[in-house]
Image (cartoon, grey):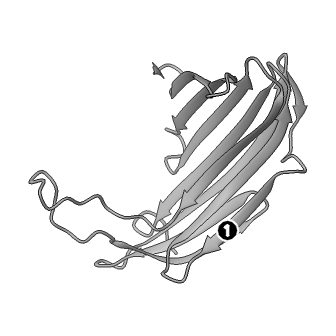
Amino acid sequence: RILNIEEGYTLRDVTWCSPGGKKLQIQIKRMASFEKLTLFTMEYRVTPLNFSGNVQLESMHIADVRNYSNPADPRLAAERLQNLQVISMETGQGRSISVGRTSESGLRMCAACGHHVKITAENQIKEQSVPENSSIRCSLSSDGKTESCFLVQAKVTEKEQLILEKYCVLTDSIRYAD
């Protein structure tokens, strides 16, 4: 883990090896903006180190937020598990937007996520849009759980980087009008 205070991001760098011996370098970079306080970003870089083939990334936007609770743990507040009710969720063109309301105060919040995908080879951008074989799906179950999943599937060669950038904005009715 790296915390770069000057440039304002955290970085995790992991080399992962599959049971079949395929190695991937995975870098996860996170940033919260000090200029636009509602904005935060995540960048995932996946590089096959010893193979060429298909790589799949899934980016979730889960609106059905639940609080962690354990009645046996005195450090935790004894409150209900779900204080945010999902009002709506929409997806399209690599983006998802959810709107929710708090159960006690009635405050509203909106969370939006957008994605950008590119593949680089030797630091040259090869592709800047969502690959043709990528897809996005959204599901709303009958019990009110709402989530969206941005799914990217791409063929990459050894040493190429598949980069998924996720931009998220979170607003609420205290700071912004509906």
Residue positioned 53% across, 35% down in the render: 31
Residue positioned 12% across, 51% down in the render: 75
Q: Quadrant of residue 142?
A: bottom right
Give neighbour class at mark 1: few <14, some 14-19, many 20+ (Cα, 10 Å).
some
| Residue sitting farthest toward the bottom | 142
Q: Is residue 97 left or right of residue 47?
A: left
Q: Is residue 147 above or below residue 159?
A: below
Q: Amino acid at mark 1?
A: Cys
Q: Position of residue 84 (x, y in %)?
A: 39, 72
Q: Quadrant of residue 117?
A: top right
Say which residue label 1 marks: 138
Residue positioned 85% across, 25% down in the render: 157
Q: Position of residue 86 (x, y in %)?
A: 48, 75
Q: Quadrant of residue 20?
A: top right
Q: Is residue 154 left or right of residue 65?
A: right
User: Viewer-proximal residue, 142 or 37?
Assistant: 142
Q: Is residue 86 left or right of residue 151?
A: left
Q: Is residue 55 left or right of residue 15?
A: right
User: Viewer-proximal residue, 52 or 161?
Assistant: 52
Q: Is residue 139 above or below residue 51?
A: below
